[in-house]
Image: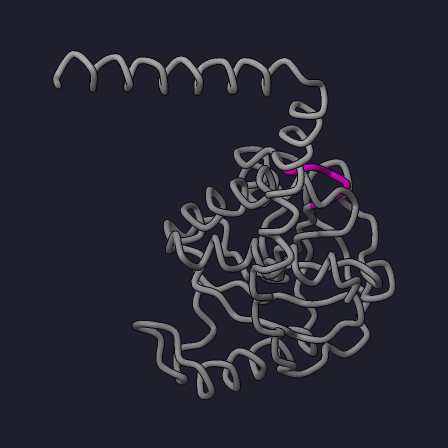
Amino acid sequence: MVPHMSSHAATNEGRLQRAAAGLVGRPVFWVVLVSALFAFPLVRSFLRPLPPERPMLGELPTFVTAQVAGVNAGQTLSSESLRGKVWVATFIEPTDPDCERLGEVLEHVQRRSRNLGDAWRMVSFVPGGAEPEVVNAYAQRRHPNALRWFFAAVPPPIESAVENAMYRAAVLAPLPGTGASRVHGKHLGVLIDGHGRIRGLYDLLTPSGENAVLMDMGLLANLNE
């Protein structure tokens, strides 16, 4: 009985091998296989749930201010020049240790945002009385792209508007360790869409904050908002 069973198993195995060889040898098999491999990521992307829409947290007033660092020093920066771009606003004091860490994170964000092409900007507002040499030294350490990352003196209306938006966001969705009374932190970033509307508040000194702002930048850029 055992030899008979072994012979039967060998016969079945041989049939399977011949069937597999015949299938692999057919061009249609490879066409179907390659099509399936290409289709799988597309199907998965269609089935993946969309991230929630970013809330509206206010709108910035129109502004015109002066750039104070790098090759753009002395040039103007305005809300109109940022129209149509998704941008991240931060407040920086160049001599503050926390802002040195923030600069490192913003450098990461700049590098990781390259796939967004020309759709994004970063604006680091510095105090109006900051010494240009100090701001320049800070910027040079971070290697900003002159077309993407700007350093500008902060106009009081913008500081007030962004601070108010931070307060509202902190009340509605407090960040860990950030009370509503401490929203003008040196580690916070504000996401603004192409229409000048404030869409998010992030603790940029945490990996989750850095990843979240990058994800939301990409979402708004792809939605053309």
Camera-nearest residue between 215 and 20: 20
Picture coordinates of residue 105 (x, y %)? 47, 46
Q: Would residue 73 be found to the left or right of residue 124 on screen?
A: right
Residue drawn at the location 58% of the way across and 51% of the way down: 44
Residue drawn at the location 40% of the way across and 57% of the way down: 208
Q: Determine which quarter of the picture holds residue 223.
A: bottom right
Picture layout, residue 10 above or below residue 133: above
Q: Looking at this rendering, what residue extends furthest in the left direction?
A: 2
Picture coordinates of residue 177 (x, y %)? 30, 72
Picture coordinates of residue 86 (x, y %)? 72, 59
Q: Would residue 123 be found to the left or right of residue 1 on screen?
A: right
Residue drawn at the location 66% of the way across and 53% of the way down: 122
Query: From the image, which quarter does the C terminus lie in?
Result: bottom right
Picture layout, residue 158 above or below residue 15: below
Camera-nearest residue between 40 and 154: 40
Q: Would residue 223 be found to the left or right of residue 52 on screen?
A: right
Q: State the predominant SS element of the stretch in magenta.
A: loop
Picture layout, residue 44 above or below residue 47: above
- Report the magenta residues as a range: 144-148
Q: Determine which quarter of the picture holds residue 73.
A: top right
Query: From the image, which quarter does the N terminus lie in?
Result: top left
Camera-nearest residue between 98 and 203: 203
Q: Determine which quarter of the picture holds residue 2.
A: top left
Q: Is residue 97 magenta?
A: no
Q: Is residue 145 magenta?
A: yes
Residue drawn at the location 74% of the way across and 38% of the way down: 146
Picture coordinates of residue 45 (x, y %)? 61, 53
